[in-house]
Image: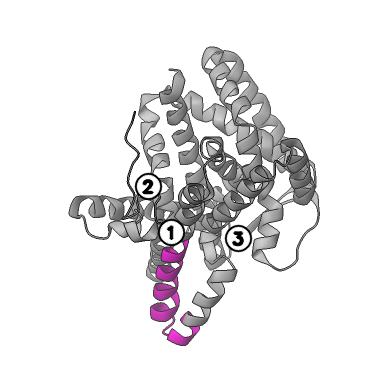
Amino acid sequence: MSGNASRLEWVDMAKGLSILLVVMMHSAFGVGEETGATGYLHWVIAWASPFRMPEFFAISGLFLSQVIARDWARYADRRIVHYFYFYALWALIHILFKVALGAGDPLMALSYIGWAIVEPYGVLWFIYMLGVFSAVTKFLHEIRAPHLAVLGFAAVLQMAPIHLGSYIVDQFAEYFVYFYAGYVLAPQLFRLVEWTERHLALATAGLAAWALIETALVFSPGFAVMPGAVNGGLSELPGLHLILALLGAGALCVFAALLTRLPFMDWLRWMGSKSIVIYLAFALPMAVSRTVLMKLGVISDTGLLSTIVMVVAIVSPLVLYWLVERTGWGKFLFERPAWAHIPGTPGSRNYQAVPAE
C-alpha cells in the first residue's frame, strides 16, 4: 500500500510498538524492584533502551508541520492545551487513587497536586513534555529559527551532562532533539517508508544489519541489567547514544511499515491508534495487578510476573475505553469536553465553522 492511508497505518503500527515497549519497561522494572530479580523482559528493554522513548517523541512530531503555521489560539488548542488537559486530569486521578486513597493521606495528596503543576508527575511526564515541546517549537517557528541550527543546538543539549534536578529542564535537554527531528525530518522519514514498501528485501536486510549493530553496542563492556534499571554499555556514550536513538527511531518506522503487510499484526496497529488511551491509564492497573500478584505469591518467576502485569496494564485501559464508548459515561477521560477548548477554536462551545465558498 502507499499514500496517506498507508502512512497512517505504519504510524499507528509504530505507536503500537512504542507503547508496548513503554508499558513493558515500567512493568518489568516495577516487578523487578519487588522481587529483587530480573526476567526476560529486562533483556528486551535493555536492547530497546537507546530508541524506546526517542522514537515515541519523534513520531509525536511527525505531523506538526500540518498545524505549525496556524494562529496561536488554534495551534495551542490542538497541540498544547490538548496535552495539558489530559495531563492535569490523569495526574489528579493518579494522585487521588495512589496518595489520597492508597496511602490514606489527603494532605500529602494536595502537596503532590501542587508539585504536579511545576514538575511532571510520574509516568505522565511524557504527556506534559509533549505540551512543552509543542509550545517551544511553535515559538521557534514564529521567530523563524533555522531548522538545522535548532536541531544542532538540541543535539548538543542531549549530549551535554545536564542534570539540574528539575525534571522539566533535564527531560527537555534529553528528548527535545527527537521531537524536533520528527518535525523537521518528517519528509525524509516518509520517503524512507515509501522506499521500504518498494524494496522489501533491501529494507529487511538493512533492519537486520541495524539490529546487529544495536545488539553489539548495547551488550558491550559496561552492560548491566538490574531489577529496576539497565546500563546499555557503549550505547550510553554521549553522541553514540544520540546516533543510535535516531537510527533506532528510523528503523522502528521501517519495521512498522513492514508489519503493516502482515494481517495478523493488525492488533498492534489498532493498539497504536489507542496509544494515548493506554499511556494515560496503564499505571493504575499495573500497580494494582503487581501488588495483588506479589501478595498471592503463586508465581515466583520475575519474567512471567512482568508479562502478566504488562498484559493487564495494556488491556485494562482498552476495556475502560470500550466501556466509555459503549455507555457514553466518562467521555471526558479520553475526549476533551467543550469547556476544555480555547474559545473560538474547533470543539469549543462558541466555535462556528467558516462556510466553504
Mark 2 vs mark 3: in front: 2
Residue 105 seen from this side:
no
Residue 122 seen from this side:
yes
Find the distance from the CA under tag 2 to the CA under tag 3: 46 Å
The colour style of the image is: one colour
Q: Are marks 2 and 1 in contact (CB under 8 Å)?
A: no
User: Which quadrant of the figure contains the N terminus?
Assistant: top left
Q: Are marks 2 and 3 in contact (CB under 8 Å)?
A: no
Residue position for label 3: 227
Residue position for label 1: 86
Residue position for label 2: 346
Tag 2: Cα neighbours inside 10 Å, few (<14), some, or many (≥20)?
some
Q: Amino acid at mark 1?
A: Phe
Q: Check residue 319 in the rendering and tell me which mark sits there, or answer none.
A: none
Judged left or right of residue 301, residue 312 is: left
Is 105 inside the magenta-drawn segment?
A: yes
Q: Secondary structure at mark 2?
A: loop
| Residue at the outermost left position | 327
Q: Secondary structure at mark 3?
A: loop
List x then y, in percent, for residue 213.
Answer: 71, 32
Find the distance from the CA under tag 2 to the CA under tag 1: 17 Å
Span shown in magenta: 87-109
Identify the mark nearer the N-term, 2 or 1: 1
Q: Secondary structure at mark 1?
A: helix
Judged left or right of residue 186, residue 165 is: right
Q: Amino acid at mark 3?
A: Pro
Depth order, front residue of 73/151: 73
Q: Amino acid at mark 2?
A: Pro
Depth order, front residue of 213/344: 344
